[in-house]
Image (cartoon, grey):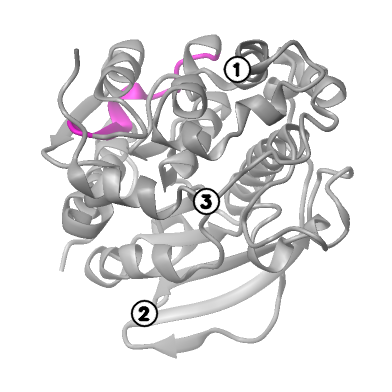
């Protein structure tokens, strides 16, 4: 039996107990699943061009600008085809080769950029590390008509979101590399961290990876952890063999992104993994499994739960992003963050 779940996670689970995902069933999951092949994961990202809405605006010591690009994932629904990004840079411009940059993915249920801006603003201001924040497909400005908030309606749409985050994340890394950035990284929290890890594993060069609140497999998150309470397995299994068969079927669709099915990152030593010992959503065992699989990575532990990691330990998450980039600089001889 693992460590007890933190009370904050239990409170969050009760507060969101009426939330239900996949209320319209599996959708087109059976059609979408074969797309997520090893060849697709290894494919070169399609080029993108970001259109910036306006010149950067100065916010304190930051230069902030918002932009859009056409998603390389053609079967995303309607408005979700337009990807939205926010760039955070230090106000004092630096040459691209001296400007470390993260691509930052959103967590489950995270619409917009406010939470990630709040988390990473001190990093950009104090070290000069820049960040490109990607709005998840189907969330926020990319929410399709008929969807309530960030409540994804089918398993197939959840898989499309995953495909979109991966393809768009790789495309953003390629966009940065084409502009001369040599010190690149991926990061995110929870689901965002899982995608950050996948993109890092599939990127052809060394990247920093700050993996905050994610483990080796997402299957336990959806079928056993507190998040699984959002899934009405009785409803999902109607006409598909019942609740237990639905649980197993969902696991088969999700396990394609398990990180032990993918290569190690080119520079595991530039990976800093942060886990919470009392996490009710992503178990400490899964975090430890990821650390052991990514030989050479560092794992750090917080004495809290999933929600408490952000609410109470934001500074520890920030340190992980800074130190992962520093590790990349030491490993590659590239530019390092300039602590101020």
Q: Quadrant of the N terminus?
A: top left
Q: Is residue 45 visible?
A: yes
Q: Residues within 10 Å of mark 2 (few under 14, many from 20)?
A: few
Give the percent coordinates (x, y) of residue 174: 64, 45
Along the line of sight, the residue nearer the viewer: 130 or 136? 136
Q: Is residue 277 magenta?
A: yes
Q: Is residue 183 visible?
A: no
Along the line of sight, the residue nearer the viewer: 148 or 101? 148
Marks 2 and 3: in contact by CB < 8 Å?
no
Toward which corner of the image does residue 46 lie, by quadrant? top right
Q: Tag on residue 92?
A: 2
Give the number of callouts: 3
Toward which corner of the image does residue 117 lie, by quadrant? bottom left
Q: Residue furthest left?
A: 303
**In the image, is 340 to the left or to the right of 149?**
left
Mark 1 and mark 3 lie on one chain; the one further toward the N terminus is 3
Dot 2: element: loop
Along the line of sight, the residue nearer the viewer: 81 or 270? 81
Does residue 257 sit above or below 50 in this rendering? Answer: above
Dot 1: element: helix
Give the percent coordinates (x, y) of residue 44: 73, 31
Does residue 43 sit above or below 148 in this rendering? Answer: above
Q: Which residue is mark 1?
A: 247
**In the image, is 278 to the left or to the right of 197?**
left
Dot 3: element: loop
Q: Tag on residue 18?
A: 3
Q: Give the Cα separation between the discs numbered 3 and 2.
A: 47 Å
Give the percent coordinates (x, y) of residue 186: 45, 43
User: Which segment is the magenta one?
Assistant: 262-278
Mark 3 and mark 2 lie on one chain; the one further toward the N terminus is 3
Marks 3 and 1: in contact by CB < 8 Å?
no
Q: Is residue 137 magenta?
A: no
């Amino acid at each position: 039996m693992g460590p007890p779940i933190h009370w904050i996670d239990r409170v969050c689970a009760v507060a969101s107990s009426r939330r239900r995902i996949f209320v319209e069933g599996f959708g087109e999951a059976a059609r979408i699943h074969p797309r997520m092949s090893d060849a697709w994961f290894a494919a070169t990202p399609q080029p993108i061009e970001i259109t910036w809405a306006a010149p950067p605006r100065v916010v304190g010591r930051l230069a902030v600008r918002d932009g859009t690009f056409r998603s390389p994932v053609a079967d995303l629904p309607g408005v979700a085809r337009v990807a939205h990004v926010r760039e955070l840079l230090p106000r004092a411009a630096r040459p691209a080769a001296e400007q470390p940059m993260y691509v930052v993915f959103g967590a489950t249920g995270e619409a917009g950029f406010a939470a990630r801006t709040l988390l990473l603003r001190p990093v950009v201001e104090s070290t000069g590390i820049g960040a490109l924040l990607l709005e998840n497909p189907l969330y926020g400005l990319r929410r399709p008509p008929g969807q309530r908030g960030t409540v994804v309606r089918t398993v197939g749409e959840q898989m499309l979101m995953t495909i979109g985050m991966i393809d768009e994340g790789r495309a953003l890394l390629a966009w940065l590399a084409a502009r001369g950035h040599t010190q690149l990284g991926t990061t995110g929290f929870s689901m965002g961290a899982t995608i950050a890890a996948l993109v890092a594993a599939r990127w052809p060069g060394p990247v920093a990876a700050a993996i905050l609140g994610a483990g080796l497999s997402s299957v336990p998150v959806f079928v056993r952890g507190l998040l699984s309470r959002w899934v009405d397995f009785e409803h999902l299994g109607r006409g598909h063999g019942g609740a237990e068969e639905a649980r197993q079927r969902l696991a088969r669709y999700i396990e394609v992104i398990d990180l032990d099915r993918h290569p190690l990152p080119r520079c595991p030593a530039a990976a800093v993994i942060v886990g919470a010992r009392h996490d009710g959503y992503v178990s400490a065992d899964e975090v430890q499994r990821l650390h052991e699989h990514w030989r050479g990575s560092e794992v750090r532990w917080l004495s809290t739960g999933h929600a408490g990691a952000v609410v109470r330990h934001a500074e520890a998450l920030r340190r992980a992003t800074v130190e992962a980039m520093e590790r990349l600089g030491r490993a590659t001889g590239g530019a390092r963050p300039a602590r101020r």
